[in-house]
Image (cartoon, rainbow, N blue to C red):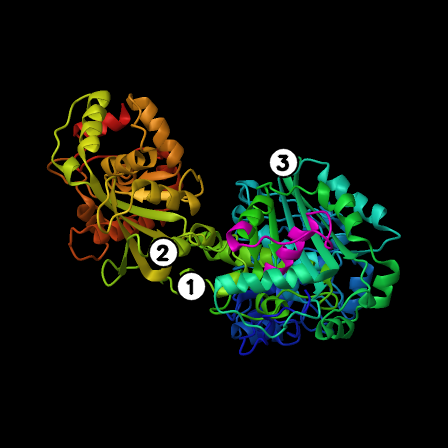
Amino acid sequence: MGVHPFAKAANGFVMQADAPDAKLADVQAVADAIHGNTKLANIQAVADVIHGNAKLADVQAVPDAIQGNTKVFDIQAVADAIHGNTMLADIQAVADAKPNIQFVPDAIHGNTKVFDIQAVADAKPDVQAVPGAIHGNTKVADNSVVADAIQGNTKLTDVHPFMEGDCSIKLADAQVRNKAVDGFDATNMSPLVARCLAHHLAKVSVQRVWQGNYPEMFKPVLDAFGQPHRRIYIAFDFEFAADAFTNMHCWPGCTKTNYEYLRRYVNGGDVVQMGLAFVFEDEVDEEPTFTAMALEINFDFTVELRKYNGEAISFLSEQGHDLTEHRDRGVVPHFVYTGLLSHLPFGNSSVTWIAYHGDYDFGFFLRLLQGGCRGSSHLPLELPTFLHQLRLNFPRLYDIRVLGQLVQHGFRGSLTAIADLLGVNRFGRGHHAGVDALLTLSCFFQIVSCLSASGDHQLHRLDSRQGLLAGIAQVNKAIKDARHIGDRTSNIDVIKVQAGNLDEEAQRIQELVPSNFNIIGVEVMHPQLGNRSYAIGAQQNYESMKTYLKDADSFEIVIAFVNSEGMLAYDCVWKFCISSTPRSGCLHPRQFTRLMASCGATSNPNVSWVTFHGAHGIASLISSFSAPQDLPSDWPSYVEQRRAYFPGMYDVALIVHRYPDIGILPTTGCKGGLFDVARALDLNFIKDDNPVTRVLLTLRCYMRLADRGDFPDKQSAVQGQLMENCCWNCPAKRMEHA
């Protein structure tokens, strides 16, 4: 990327043991590098490749050093079987003779051989001479991703390396293969596949694009996009220059001024270089394969054409960019748009876009999508419009600097720093867009691998960061002030929204859904409905409810926004008094309706509304949304309208009903109320039946249920259904399920 106005030096990083400087001769360093500071009890794969000048038949010193004088098994027999008592005296000579070996045929876990060495040798005669993971100067830690992923009798019999423009990973074991292909996005990718991708992407050749060769360089990419794919991953990076009027040392402190500065910077600047790295996932004979390619597009850029910021120009020159060559051979932005960008699948949710500190990169990208980067192409005036355009074009995007917080708490370092923390090697010079795009993509797959391998449903942590851009997110107070909902049902700020503070609070609330606070707890207090009687049939019950709603003049709503990690936005909840007639301290229903629509909370399938026994309360909301129109006359039409407003509506009481082991009261068969459910879920709480306590406790119950592995299936089974009260035999249940 170019000189980023918010770039800071990375200090105090704890380097992992798999850093590139780890030497094979240092047994413990290798062991640490492969298994994260845990001594290897199953080090045969390492033992076979350490000490290049030692006979494999005499490696007692190696297992002694690693395992405290305990042999892993009979090394002599393995050495004889593979090498016939031959010395492995010259590792480089062996690697040169067999340069394409990319897997570990003798990886051992415990005392069980993962591979039948002879069978592998028979099937792959070209691998007999090379034990372990010898690849010239490639370290064991680079290849251990394969060995580490093999457990018990799961075999990875053939892992091919990435080749320029073409690569494939074939998984022979059905269990591993299914884990790799099930689902839709990278969060369902197996740790094995993600780690292989991460460590081999850097070896893909970057194709340099100039005015004289851009059609032929674009063609392989366009051909690839012309074919159907299961998934596509695209990482990108820009090198750019600001104009002379841009202050490179500005540090905006809030989202509004941050975007104003970003807009000024991007609108006044020009792109010098664009890097794109692609991974296409397909299936061949029911096995996933991956094709990778990378472009580095050099733009037409003339320093003398206009006044540029001197610091930016000096930085580009210091990084090895020949700006004279850009002037003479660079591609005109319009040709990049017509020749490549106009053919890419923007707006397709099956494509995952990845950048590093991507706020400025995405800004320049949006300008390019307007047909070029000069003249009339500009970013919009307001941040919400910018974010809307961003999501239209890049519905699934990740910023590696934001994801870096999953690797190291409070991470704010460079791309190289996060790569070092992850143990991902860089090939090529930094601040060159093609190389940086490849490294960005490698880091993404390594993070996916680490999260998926750690278990405990850690991949949901990606969801809460999807779509967040580093610069904007850093100054977003909704994120900065958020606190985990944890065991808290008290000491939460309650903001009462009235006419006097509506605009201020609306501005804060409008940031929440775009910031992934897309789980909304809601509690509606409607005194009139609490005293009504119940009918038996769904239509009769609905008619009764409509009558009470029509006679009711006002009600209160409490809402709270959390993300998928349970972080409560701004560490507060909002309370609204709604009245259809003028009343001090109350809002008109249409004001609340406009607010919910403007923040993207309604009619949005990506937002989950969460309630407990919420049939009446949600009916009150829909009544206010529909005003001055009446609710539909019949029950089925009302249910259809409700789902249009709240496509992701969930009643915790109904989710709990799907779990026979939770909260059953033995004498009545009744699941009970909210406090009964919270107690059954082992939540600590103070029994306080006020709406703020209830909405927070409802969210805590929902998040506790979400920790269960089968939660998505249970949740989807009751999507859009609501209950009225705590008894499972009550007419309300029959009404909702009629």
- On whether residue 363 falls in the magenta region, the answer is yes
**Vertical arrangement, residue 186 with respect to residue 437, above or below:** above
- Disc 3: which residue: 286
Cα separation, mark 2 vs mark 3, equals 52 Å
Q: Which residues are magenta?
A: 357-385
Q: Quadrant of residue 198?
A: bottom right
- Picture coordinates of residue 64, whole percent (x, y): 56, 74
Could you classify mark 3 by the number of other residues whose Cα lies within 10 Å: few (under 14), some (14-19), or many (20 or more)?
few
Residue at the image position 39 percent from the left and 43 percent from the top: 594
Spot occupied by residue 575 in the image (x, y as percentages of width and height): 27, 52
Residue 485 visible? The answer is: no
Closer to the chain start, of discs 3 and 1, is 3
What label sits on residue 353 in the rendered view? none
Disc 2 marks which residue?
A: 505
User: Is residue 483 located in the magenta-colored stretch of the structure?
Assistant: no
Q: Nearer the viewer, mark 1 or mark 2?
A: 2
